[in-house]
Amino acid sequence: MLRLLRLLTWRDLILIFMCLCLIVAQVWLSLKLPDYMATITRLVQTPHSAMRDILYAGGMMMLCTLGIFVITFITGFFVAKTSSGLAMRLRRRVFDKTMSFSIGEMNKFSTASLITRTTNDITQIQMFFMMALKIGIRAPIMAVWAALKMYDKGWEWTAVTGIFVVVLLMMIGTIYALAIPKFTIVQKQTDNLNRVTRENLAGIRVVHAYNAEAYQERKFGRANDKLTKTSLFTHRLMSVAEPGTQFLLTGLILAIYLVGAYIINGAPDAARLGLFSDMIVFSSYATQVIASFMILTFILLFLSRATVSARRINQVLDAPINIIDGTVRHGNAPSGTIEFRDVCFRYPDASADTLHNISFIARPGETVAIIGATGSGKSTLVNLVPRFYDVTSGAILVDGVDVRNYTQRALRNRLGYASQRAVMFRGTVTSNVAYGDNGRRRATREMVRRAVKIAQAKNFVEKMDGKYNAKIAQGGTNLSGGQRQRLSIARAVCRAPEIYIFDDTFSALDYKTDRALRAELRRNTGGATTLLVAQRVGTIMNADQILVLENGRIVGRGTHDELMKSCPIYIEIAKSQLGNGGE
């Protein structure tokens, strides 16, 4: 928790200091009220007391109450500003760190957990920080100051108050010990509920298609019930604190009055009025002490939950980054050259390599296609070029430089990447096609239109309401699979990169559109190098070089004609798709 407080700025520290001063003033005014109450009690019971003195004491009580109100309002304003600023910086830090994660780190935490940590966990810290500043600082100051003021009022009353404080501390300690483990479980179960919800919403079409609503409801219900039961346990624990403290507070006041009755009855007549006044003042101070401990009870409970959240946030901030930025910005070889040198790759925590000794060169202007059975490592191979993962052994060179030596921005600005699953962001056609940074060159309207035309998306885009300013829903849910793929390809084309990476990006296109799109790419991509992953032989027949993968190994390479003579696996794929001997 203390580590996260380092994000406080000097301005925040000044506001906190001002809050501390205001709280001290608030405590002083609060502790003046019993003194004025004692004065009024003494004046009322003293014969021939002047009314103006009683009214003066009452007026001072009203002024103190007004001062407490004003100070509380100003303190609340400062506290809200400080806690909201801390939460904002925390969210930014966690989000920025998440953006630097490779796919491996993302899988380690899970998307659902990272969302919970960025939202719910930071909210828990914000709430604790707000309560700690607003009433947490006030409570110990009030308790100590009130205890000092009532110390000389009578050792009997002090002893009774001490006994009740010890009982209260024992109750708080028990609740605190039981609550901490449960708060950890609550956050994990919140992660799980988030995961189940995301899974259900992302796959809603499949859920409907298979009439699996009841199954998903039961699945959600189990996760929801677990979270509810654990939350109920923690809330029941917390619910014991307030009535328990109120019970002790009422018992303390009765005990003070009972002891006071014995003391007053045994005192001389002349001293009884002073003792009665002291009893009134002492009971007010004792109430403040117990109330302060009650506040500390809630602060400690919030602290226990905020501590769990802080630990989870620090896990994200402290997570090691596997993809380390290099320093090189410019290559040595002709632009667009890609070379794989004896590359092996193993996924984190996997028992065996996914890719084995991959070596090939793709020169500027060439198209290198990768084909193979599902699970053969095609997507893994091309995902190593933009460093979504780093190779386990061997090296990948772009323009003659190991990709690990480039800055990630410089490397990725060379690439036009279209993923296997076309990703659309909420916005417009233009914002999706012109997405990203390519050396801070902003895409013009003409560049967007040209890219859309090359990607064979012009016809459907210009029929949309708003055309290039047409709204795109989150995830592109208002588009078909083929439309999303074409806009994803247009996004890559719009960058005019040195290297294109198409990871099975043509799978949702019909053969006519596929053929027309590839023809446009050949005419308009200039001397760019293309890595093309595909399942269809028709998509890759005209590639300059075709790599056939099986179980992460290259088992054939060459042109279509060469492979039809030398590679049994390729021949089998071609015959199954093309017929007539694969011609």
Image: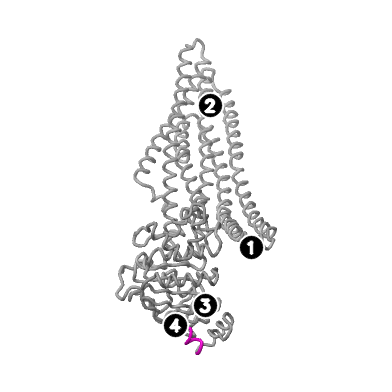
Q: Is residue 563 magenta?
A: yes
Q: Residues within 10 Å of mark 1 (few under 14, many from 20)?
A: few
Tell me where the magenta segment starts and ends, as one range. 559-565
What distance separates the C-alpha of mark 1 from that of mark 4?
39 Å
The label nearer to you, 1 versus 4, is 1
Q: Are marks 1 and 4 in contact (CB under 8 Å)?
A: no
Helix, strand or loop at mark 1 = helix
- Which residue bears the numbered disc 1? 206
- Image disc number at residue 357: 4
* Earlier-in-chain disc, 4 versus 3: 4
Q: Position of residue 126 (x, y in %)?
A: 47, 46
* Image depth: mark 3 or mark 2 in front: 3
Q: Which residue is mark 2?
A: 279
Q: In front here: 394 or 161?
A: 394
Give neighbour class at mark 4: few <14, some 14-19, many 20+ (Cα, 10 Å): some
Which residue sits at x=44%, y=48%? 87
Category of crowding for the residue at label 3, using alpha-carbon neighbours closer than 10 angstroms: few (below 14), some (14–19), many (at least 20): some
The mark that comes first in sequence, 1 or 4, is: 1
Residue 163: image location, x then y, percent: 55, 39
Q: Earlier in the sequence, mark 1 or mark 2?
A: 1
Q: Are marks 3 and 2 in contact (CB under 8 Å)?
A: no
> Label 2 is placed on what type of residue?
Met
User: Residue 226 in the image: x percent, y percent?
Assistant: 64, 55
User: Which sits in the foreground, 514 or 66?
Assistant: 514
The amino acid at mark 3 is Gly
Q: Which mark is residue 538?
A: 3
